[in-house]
Image (tube, rainbow, N blue to C red):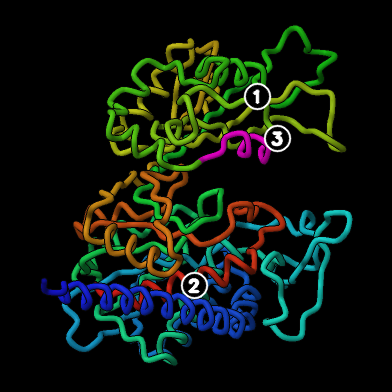
Amino acid sequence: MKKPIYRLPVIVLVFISFLSVAQRDIHLDKVSKTFADDSLPMLMELLSIPNDAFYPASIEQNVVWCEKQFGQRGFFTQRIATTHAPLLLAERKHPKAKKTVLIYLQLDGQPVDSTRWFQESPYKPVIKKKNQNNEWEETAWEYAGTLDDEMRIFARSASDAKGPVVMFLAALDAAAANKIAPNYNIKVIMDFEEELGSPRLPEAVIKNSDRLKADMLIIFDGPRHISNKPTLTFGARGIATITLTTYGPVVSQHSGHFGNYAPNPALRLSKLLASMKDDDGRVTIPGFYDGINIDAETEEILRNVPDNEDEINNRLQIVSADKVGSYYQEAIQYPSLNIRGMQSGWIDEKVRTIIPGWARAELDVRLVLESDPERLIHLVKEHVAGQGYYVTDTEPTENERQMHHRIATFTSEISYQSFRTDFDSEVGLWLTSALKNAFGEYPIRIRMSGGSIPISPFVNTLNIPAVTVPTVNRDNNQHSPNENLRIGNYRAGVKTMLAILWEKL
């Protein structure tokens, strides 16, 4: 009987393949940690540059910094002019490349209230660790390699989203030092007005579609899944905003003299807003959720995300969630109507006994692909009118005040629409493979995030699929005081981006 010698090469090849992957994992861990730690001074430097988009001089410093850093790494950079802050495009071609990957990075940050930060300045980054009382305290460090993964960098935009910018630069350095050459061309588009809703982006993409042409788009932004495991997000909700103002007396009046007589606009606004939702948080405006269908295939995708809703509720310190969906992933598949801020009169140490002259609410509407944003805004506006309000888009005149019992000023703006990419698209399969090879397990794949990023202009104008590769810790205080980036996530982020540079397309 002949021996089945044909099996031996197969076993050997499998063993060699396994060994190669194992060596690659070890190599990635070591190299990415080294270059992540070595790049921390660069991150501190970038975080020290103020980046509120309301201040053009500060934004210019960020643009210049990026031009220098990408130029040093072999990228040709060019500014794309807008009526405000420019976009910055960096491009690097690679020999024999047949595909082009466009990468989106964000450099601006939310405004800061420095009085609520527990450090000298939000633009003076510090490293903190938890003390015995579970409180964050500042710590000194001499060499980045001595930092524990659980320590954090506290600064504005540490996570959203300067951290990912420097992760990518560090990954480029690691790839160059280890002769890892991508087999695709790279274009990087840098946005300096994302926190303003990227108002100039759609027009810029249309006007520069040839320069931005690519086969796919990767967005390095956002937090990983709450489990902090490698994550890919295949869509995001869009966003529109509404400003709603109600009126009382033409100027604030003494509540003793005119209480029980002059209508209170804060009460009217409260009742108006309350009429838009039921006690379970569902929008009651007819037709608001029309067009959304969670079929069996979608349900399976959503259920595959390993959310622990008890943990989510504990982090939020809430007993129960709203009932728009029966679980978290289902909830964010629907458009939302959110009160993001309210103002009327004065509170705290400035409180006074008056009937305010006006009350104002700022609303945001998170959009999904199946919903027309203009239609949703129209539904909200019609609801306000249906509650007995004369609706105008300007401050009411004296004549209008004397003609109408209830007046509301209603203005709105559509920032950008939602987007979604199939899991089995070329970019989806490629990124899934890259993260699996890097971390030894399949990444968590999320159909759509609840947040919004201005990507739909790229998807719609350039006709390319887009996937977000989130890297930062979810509990990063994004948009809030004491924003932070976990050291372990920074290191893993560099590893993630190095793996993508390594993965053949």
Q: Position of residue 332 (x, y in %)?
A: 44, 35
**Residue at mark 3 to residue at mark 2: CA–CA distance:** 32 Å
Helix, strand or loop at label 2? It is helix
Who is closer to the viewer here, 199 or 107?
107
Q: Main secondary structure of the magenta part?
A: helix
Helix, strand or loop at label 3? It is loop
The image shows residue 238, relative to residue 354, as above or below, that is below
Could you classify mark 2 by the number of other residues whose Cα lies within 10 Å: few (under 14), some (14-19), or many (20 or more)? Answer: many
Residue located beneath label 1 in the image: 250
Residue that appears at 36% across and 73% down? 18
Q: Position of residue 106 (x, y in %)?
A: 47, 65
Residue that appears at 54% across and 81% down? 30
Who is closer to the viewer here, 121 or 61?
121
Helix, strand or loop at label 1? It is loop
Q: Is residue 53 rendered to the left or right of residue 156?
A: left
Name the kind of residue labelled 3 in the image.
Answer: Gln
Q: Magenta stretch: residue 309 in it? A: yes
What range of the chain is rendered magenta? 307-317
Q: Is residue 246 visible?
A: yes
- The answer to which of marks 3 and 2 sits earlier in the sequence is 2
Residue that appears at 88% across and 54% down? 133
**Residue at mark 1 to residue at mark 2: CA–CA distance:** 50 Å
